[in-house]
Amino acid sequence: MGALLGLLLGVGLLMVLRAGSPKSARSSDRLSLHQRATEKLAQAGLSSITPARLAASGFALGLVVLLIMFVVSRSVVIALVFAALAGYTPFGLVGVRHRRRQDELRDLWPDAVDNLASAVRAGLSLPEALSQLGVRGPEGLRPAFSEFGEDYRATGRFSECLDGLKAKLADPVGDRVIEALRTAREVGGSDLGRLLRTLSAFLREDARTRAELESRQSWTINAARLAVAAPWILLLLLSFRPEAVRAYDSAAGLVVLGFGAALCLVSYRVMLKIGRLPREERVLR
């Protein structure tokens, strides 16, 4: 009986280890912090800016605000608080631009796919149809498709040019569209026009549903931003009064402001988590 229990325990442990091995393999494929930052900058349309330059701009802005607030308030504690907020500002702006650009691209893709379907129906090949989007496609997508057309005319390698287009766009919806076109190109057949029309209808319905849900959730996000900004605007106004500054210019004041900043940050993230729809991940890089 004891040997049977030992055997079952060994088999159970072996199954647990084998079940965990794919997860560990997947974890090794995750992007590093630098790669995630680079991809986020590309998704925000700021591919010319490196993560190092973004961090340097945050540090420089924080240092400038630190000096200005110290001159205004004569308080190191208040100056440090506003310097930390200013240092985070470039990262926050990148996040805002990233979300805004993803929303814009989500609205542009149905028109782009419609243009592709029309070009294919007119007799153009798939590479030619993609290249003409750099001239006649939606304005926000033209630079990426113009670069695709130049690469394809220079190399003639459709698959590699599609990979470059994916890296240039760095968009989850774009990944799905490009992989669908790659599959249609490799498999062949006469149903490419039907595929594009179906894909366009799906993308348009998805964008419409998401826009409706986001409009209903926007009040939660706006309330979170107002609740976070209000105490720091009040602190900025109080920093012009010497008697108010003395109340914070101490170790206890630093603790109070630090605890308040941490509480605001956690509350803001929780509110965003509740009110914002989940973002699509790039699973088809």
Image: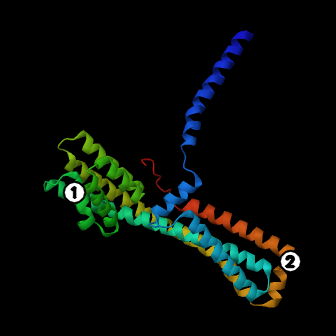
Kindly state the secondary structure of the residue where label 1 is placed.
Answer: helix
Question: Which image quarter: residue 54?
Answer: bottom right
Q: Residues within 10 Å of mark 1 (few under 14, many from 20)?
A: many
Q: Earlier in the sequence, mark 2 or mark 1?
A: 1
> In this rendering, which labeled residue sits more in front, label 2 or label 1?
1
Task: Report the front residue among 54 and 194.
Answer: 54
Identify residue type, mark 2: Ser
Say which residue appears at 55% left-offset and 72% top-offset: 222
The label number, if any, that marks residue 250 in the structure image: 2
Q: In this rendering, would 33 be left or right of 131?
A: right
User: Badge 2 local density, few (<14 within 10 Å), some, or many (20+)?
Assistant: some
Count of numbered circles in the view: 2
Q: Position of residue 103 (x, y in %)?
A: 42, 64
x, y (%) of residue 134?
Answer: 27, 64
Place of residue 240 in the rendered image (x, y in percent of width and height, measured from the top left): 74, 90
Identity, as a three-letter code, of the amino acid under mark 1: Ala
Quadrant of the frame with the N terminus: top right
- Outermost residue, left direction? 123
Residue 170 picture quarter: bottom left
Residue 239 visible here: no
Is 13 displayed left or right of 280 in the figure? right
The vertical placement of 58 against 14, above or below, is below
Which residue bears the numbered disc 1? 129
